[in-house]
Amino acid sequence: MTNSINEKVRCLIIGSGPAGYTAAIYASRANLSPVLYEGIQPGGQLTTTTDVENFPGYPEGVTGPELMEDLKQQAARFGADMRIGIATKTDLSAAPYKVTIDGEKVIETETLIIATGATAKYLGLPDENKYAGMGVSACATCDGFFYRKKTVAVVGGGDTACEEALYLASLAKQVYLIVRKPYLRASKVMQERVMKASNITVLFEHNTVGLFGEDGVEGAHLVKRMGEPDEEKVDIAIDGFFLAIGHKPNSDIFKPWIETDEVGYIKTIPGTPKTKVPGVFAAGDVADPHYRQAITAAGSGCAAAIEAERYLSEMGK
Ligand SMILES: Cc1cc2nc3c(=O)[nH]c(=O)nc-3n(C[C@H](O)[C@H](O)[C@H](O)COP(=O)(O)OP(=O)(O)OC[C@H]3O[C@@H](n4cnc5c(N)ncnc54)[C@H](O)[C@@H]3O)c2cc1C
């Protein structure tokens, strides 16, 4: 059964992270009367963190929730229509594009800005939740600075894990790289760099089964050669535990129409937020396997709104 159109808009923004709110600020100031749907996590990933010290304009730092509330208020000031709701289905076969909200309401839009972010993968241990923001992180660039001259562990065996381990090794005293397999999946060059770093110890064939600590992470419970006859329990003392086992871009509902890479990151025309579908743009982490930072997400949200405005003006709409 096809739902009928409930509303027509010129610019629809899906997602309320730094990319979505920044797109809303620019689109509303350009008179596009944007409608934004916040999704399941209003304010996006930064609402799950405390200190953000690297977003320009806050010399003393700011908490994630405060930063996101500021961005929201700024968008509201220019009249952006921000609503609670989740995009559940899309039809981008032809303009105007149709987006279903909460499985019910269908919005027809001339331009669409996809800013649905990406979700870091975790091991699924209850301790990851217990110590969230208290020593567990999925972003070395964001949180590495808090672990200067301390001891940290990175979980993962791919290029990202090696990159994160090397980045942390430049700040921390000691880095453990916890690898499930007896080898690294990372490229040869990354493997070599990791092996050469004097303060990185690679723990091959180790699984993390828990974390411990009083007021934050003080160590990890590992099992070496788990399930084998010579299985061995190993505890390491650490101050921080970094996940680097990948991200899942929130792009599933756009996939029938929009090109993604093998992981699910939306492919845009290099240097722009344009997808191959005219009038459909992607901004922030959902289209960014490389940087995944609040400021880069905000920057691409700005670019997406500018492109949406240009597209509408070229189409005479
Ligand atoms: C714990 C933590 C700490 C971090 N610390 C820092 C830091 O210090 N500095 C820094 O620069 N970066 C930091 N980051 C990274 C930063 O949060 C992200 O790069 C940034 O939030 C990406 O912004 P975004 O707008 O692309 O998406 P997100 O912030 O991921 O937001 C995605 C939005 O899309 C919405 N959404 C998803 N699917 C749908 C749907 N179907 N319908 C409607 N809405 C939908 C969600 O509800 C959410 O509002 C941190 C990340 C984490 C997890």
Image (cartoon, rainbow, N blue to C red):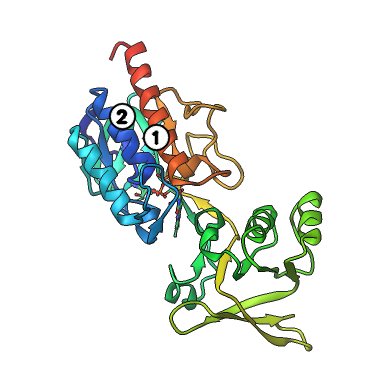
Q: Position of residue 234 (x, y in %)?
A: 68, 85
Q: In the picture shown, does residue 132 fall above or below 249?
A: below
| Mark 1 lies within 8 Å of ligand 1 (Cβ measured) | yes
- Which residue shows up at 37% across the image and 24% down it? 306
- Which residue shows up at 43% across the image and 67% down it? 133
Q: Dot 1, crowdedness within 10 Å: few (<14), some or many (≥20)?
A: many
Whether residue 10 appears in this view of the structure is: no
Q: Which residue is mark 1?
A: 301
Q: Report whether 35 appears left or right of 238.
A: left
Q: Are marks 2 and 1 in contact (CB under 8 Å)?
A: yes
N-terminal label among 2 and 1:
2
In the image, what residue type sits under mark 1?
Gly
Whether residue 234 appears in this view of the structure is: yes
Q: Position of residue 167 (x, y in %)?
A: 64, 55
Q: Quadrant of residue 269?
A: top right
Task: Look at the image and tell me in which quarter the C terminus lies.
Answer: top left
Q: Which residue is mark 2?
A: 26
Q: Quadrant of residue 63?
A: bottom left
Q: Position of residue 88 (x, y in %)?
A: 34, 47
